Amino acid sequence: MKLLLRLLDKVRPTFEDGGRLHLLHPAFEAIEHFLFAPAQTTVTAPHVRDPLDLKRFMSMAIVSLVPCILAGLYFFGLRFIAIIVVSYAAGLTVELIFAIVRKEGINEGFFVTGILFPLIMPPAVPLWMVALGVAFGVFVGKEIFGGTGRNLFNPALVGRCFLALAYPAQMSGDWLAPATETGGRLLKWVDASHLDAVTAATPLALAKQGEFVSTAHMFIGNVSGSIGETSAVAILAGGIFLLITRVGNWRSVFSTLVSFAILATILRHAQPDRFGPVLWHLCAGGLLFGAFFMTTDPVTGPVTNTGKWIYGAVIGATTVLIRNFTGYVEGVTFAILLGNIVAPILDEAVFAVRLRRLQSEG
Amino acid sequence: MKFKGGYNVLLQGKPDGAVQTMPEPDKLYLPLRSERFQFSSLAVKEGQQVQAGDVLATDPDNFDIPLLAPRTGVARLAQAENHIVLESVESLSEPTELDEREILHAEQKAGTGAAKREALVRLGAWQFLYDAHTQALPDPTGTPQAVIVSTISLEPFLARGDVLLHMRLLNFTRGLEHLQSLLEYQPIYFVIPKIRSEFADLVRNHIRGYAWVKLLEIPLIYPYGDFSILARALELSSGNGPVWAVRTEGVLAIDQALTLGRPCLTRTISIGGTGVVSPTHIEVTPGYPLKAITDKYVFEPNPRIIDGGILTGKVFGAETLGIGTECRGITVLPELKEREFLGFVRPGSDRSSFSACFLSSLTHRIRERLTTAMRGELRPCVSCNFCEEVCPAGISPHLIHKYLYRDLIEEAAYARVDLCVECGLCSYVCPSKIDLRAQFTEARRRVEQEKREAREAKAREAATEEKSV
């Protein structure tokens, strides 16, 4: 390790101001800090710091996605790896360009976006579309707002929303049927050219025609849908881990799911022949994935706990409404983006009340 | 009593329950500046022989609080910058007691209460009092709305309350009685930890007889022992007059001053932290050479030596040669030496974190061997809300940070940055490594300054109006 550190120290001048490759300093810094903890020390009190840094914080989010990634690999085959690689490559390029322009470090937040994005892609999506979508998401969803920490919208969802509107046929037309054989498609490359693997519809699309896939299948995940969203059990495993580490806040997740369940129950009771059962709806589509991995994004959600409750309620209710009363079969993406819009307003309102109460203190 | 936030930082180097006596030094270095005081008005001449307990200098801005000579010796003014050096110090010299005629004179002039307060100032006991809201020295002639007496010190690592109180319980209750005699009907709140131990029960039993003492038991979570946090939890608003606050050592000093008429010339401080051989307490006089202490206790080749605790203490400057009159503990931390390889992917069973992102949160909370490392890069705020969760003052550090980032000082004032108690927890937990505490200290200074300027402008206006009338 000492050798490696010495090597880094040796090439450092090349990347610093005046060095030949000083433009690539953010890339060098990212690699250096990936390998070795930074050399900075505290200057004033407090003289010690918590071991948690943003790298660890974001790593926990990635770790919590591992069950979904494995489920995706199992059900949809090796092509998923290619999608992940393309997503990271395209997104990192945009991130690096902005880091160079802004003369800041590469932010760890991207590494979560880079893996979230492939998970919300349809398994048959063309690779060029992955690159385009993630680049658009990172650029429009994050960088023009000022980078990680200042973005208004979840970059992965912005990318997906863009693709869904620009290429509706590819994004919701052809779906890959999940693997049915034992052993899954862990060693197989399956894309849209495999005619026997192509299916027309996701459970939610079928439901519009009055045909309900079994809830048990949706719980395990062998239904068609976006790569990461099909297996409820994998999402729950990773999601609960995320909440336990306190990287994701349980309030927004809980509130989203509860508000969704309440509204869906009401609809079901009102017209049982028109609306699906609640548990079925909870497991269908991207609801669980969105609730656990998108509403918990600290940057684009509200900061305050009260705000988080309302935020979740807005997302849950909107999802029910879009699913059941519009032409779209699924509404989680739009619901969360709408939630992102109201999040700052919710915070503003909570702070207004809280600060007024604080005025008489002390 | 309702408390918000709070968190105990666990690190190695907790002082044990013993108090060690240090060898008598032959030279004392008394700093002329401490946290609250600046002893700028000198009372001795170069080369003057002084007795233990004599006034060496006073602070004209703080009700003439004196800097006392801890031992008999020869004062040297020019030997070290910002210090009075006492040379040829005699060991174990008897301190001068207040002249009885002097006391009698003061009593005749101003009454018993005023004479007692004067004696407290003169004998160095008044400097242990704080205004709970501002942490400043309260006016010795003023009347408080209440007094908070706290035996708790929770910041790692300051002198422990139980260590200071041990064996001196009788002196302590006598000190409380003296304190009560300064008041009319105002309540004394006595704060002890909510724990079950033989010693805690002994203290409870001792206090039970005093009807005018209101016993408060609070959980041992940093920084609930902070005076302004306590004052707010007790709903003692600053609008209703000052709240006096005093710790164990202050009550003991009051006892010594009013029972024996003797000045308080020694203090018990802690020496703890990761870089100390055997963390403990030591009894020293103010001005005790810092080097003599570090030579004995510090083994780190490259330590950071801090005046106070790890969360709020200041690094001893290179020019500081002796212990100040307000020092409550010395904390020693090793500076960061080795950069960790792939630190952020390790399971982390050996680190203690506020979040639950490390393996250690599954097993048990451990005391970590901490250094001064920043442990991460500076990043923009990601609104994780950890700072708000730990904040004991009930303000929103991330919100104020965002205001200050855009230089919106008025908004920061409206968000009550002035309620910040500078406990340092927000900076400690921040995963983006933002130095919130330093930003808030600066912001509070600016808010205070603007308020003062506004007051002065108003006063000037009123004065000119009066003239014109």
Image: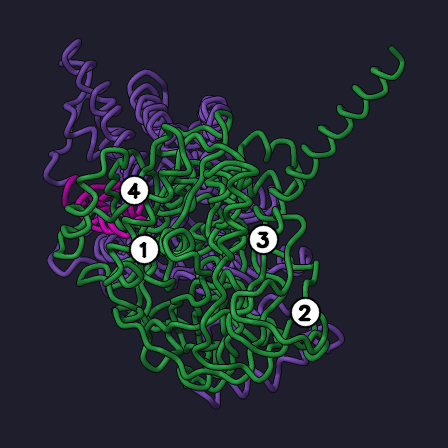
Q: Label 1: which residue?
A: B8
Mark closer to the chain start, 3 or 2: 3
Q: Would you call the spot at circle 4 few (<14 residues within 10 Å), some (14-19), or many (20 or more)?
A: some
Q: Nearer the viewer, residue B259 or B422?
A: B259
Element type at mark 4: strand
Tell me which chain appears green.
B
Mark closer to the chain start, 3 or 1: 1
Q: CA distance from mark 2 to mark 1?
A: 36 Å
User: Based on the displayed image, in which of its 4 quarters is residue A213 positioned?
Assistant: top left
Residue in the picture at 56% in, 43% down: B401
User: Based on the displayed image, in which of its 4 quarters is residue A80 positioned?
Assistant: bottom left
Element type at mark 1: loop
Q: Would you call the spot at circle 3 few (<14 residues within 10 Å), some (14-19), or many (20 or more)?
A: many
Residue A98: x %, y % from top left: 63, 55
Between disc 3 and disc 2, the foreground one is: 3
Q: Label 3: which residue?
A: B65
Q: Label 4: which residue?
A: B190
Residue A275 belongs to the span the image colors magenta:
no
Q: Label 2: which residue?
A: B82
Farthest residue, direction front? B101
- Residues in magenta, as a range: A218-247
Residue B30: x %, y % from top left: 58, 71
The reply to whether residue B110 is in sight is yes
Between disc 4 and disc 1, the foreground one is: 4
Q: Is residue B284 left or right of residue A180?
A: right
* Quarter of the figure that contains the N terminus of chain B: top left
Element type at mark 2: loop
Q: Which mark is residue A291?
A: none
